[in-house]
């Protein structure tokens, strides 16, 4: 018996009734656990509540305090990140918050320090939006309002980073506390075209 995603539903049903999780089965068929649950329900199979799996509780208690992230645990147990979150709430385990630095799932060890700093300013602050708002969402060169806007550093960012590294080395924690790096007075609003011409024009 096949469905339109070409899933062998009877095989999936047998595996699920034999104790495998919907997430584990979904991984084998390159689909989501929601699709598996949906099809099992269509077959009349009463599905288990994910957060009733006691092995998850014991694994979290053993590994989360040692530094493993919720995402890592979810991957190892082949369940969703949300399932781990529900278990943690039931166990009254307080989340450490979003992982940072080398334990973040998007951490790139090959990213240069200056690029890591630039990315932090863009993602962790309202630096760009504050500049756009101050300039009334208007390009300070051509006067065009709205559209694809860029925030440009009037003091080159590379120059600021070189000055910072000379004083502090590549210490990211000190960088996050350095107000000069987040100063909106050195930024101006430019449209995409003017920003490109400023950097690469004749």
Image (tube, rainbow, N blue to C red):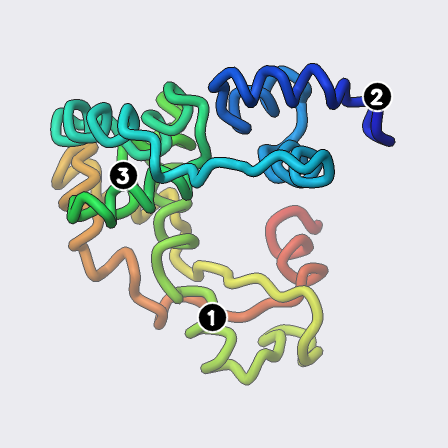
Q: In which quarter of the image is residue 52?
A: top left
In percent of width and height, residue 195 lies at 62, 58
Element type where label 3 sits in the image = loop
Which residue does the image show at 77% across and 22% down from the upper left? 7
Q: Separation of disc 1 and disc 2 at Cα?
A: 54 Å
Mark 3 is surrounded, within 10 Å at the Cα level, by few (under 14), some (14 to 19) or many (20 or more) other residues, namely few
Pointer 2 residue: 1
Asked if residue 56 is positioned above or below residue 86 in the image, the reply reads above
Q: Separation of disc 3 and disc 1 at Cα?
A: 23 Å
Q: Which mark is residue 100?
A: 3
Which residue does the image show at 66% across and 33% down from the upper left? 40
Q: Is residue 101 left or right of residue 193?
A: left
Which residue does the image show at 55% across and 21% down from the upper left? 17
Which of the two discs, 3 and 2, sits closer to the camera?
2
Q: Separation of disc 3 and disc 2 at Cα?
A: 46 Å
Q: Which of marks 3 and 2 is nearer the N terminus?
A: 2
């Amino acid at each position: 018996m096949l469905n339109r995603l070409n899933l062998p539903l009877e095989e999936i049903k047998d595996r699920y009734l034999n104790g495998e999780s919907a997430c584990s089965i979904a991984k084998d068929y390159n689909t989501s656990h929601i699709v598996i649950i949906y099809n099992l329900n269509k077959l009349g199979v009463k599905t288990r509540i994910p957060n009733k799996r006691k092995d998850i509780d014991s694994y979290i208690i053993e590994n989360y305090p040692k530094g493993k992230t919720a995402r890592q645990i979810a991957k190892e147990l082949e369940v969703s990140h949300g399932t781990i979150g529900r278990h943690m709430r039931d166990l009254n385990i307080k989340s450490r918050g979003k992982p940072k630095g080398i334990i973040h799932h998007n951490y790139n060890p090959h990213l240069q320090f200056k690029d890591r700093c630039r990315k932090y300013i863009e993602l962790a602050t309202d630096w760009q939006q504050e500049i756009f708002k101050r300039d009334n969402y208007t390009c300070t060169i051509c006067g065009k309002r709205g559209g694809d806007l860029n925030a440009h550093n009037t003091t080159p960012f590379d120059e600021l980073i070189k000055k910072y590294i000379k004083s502090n080395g590549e210490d990211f924690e000190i960088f996050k506390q350095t107000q000069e790096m987040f100063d909106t007075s050195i930024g101006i609003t430019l449209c995409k075209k003017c920003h490109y011409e400023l950097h690469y024009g004749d």
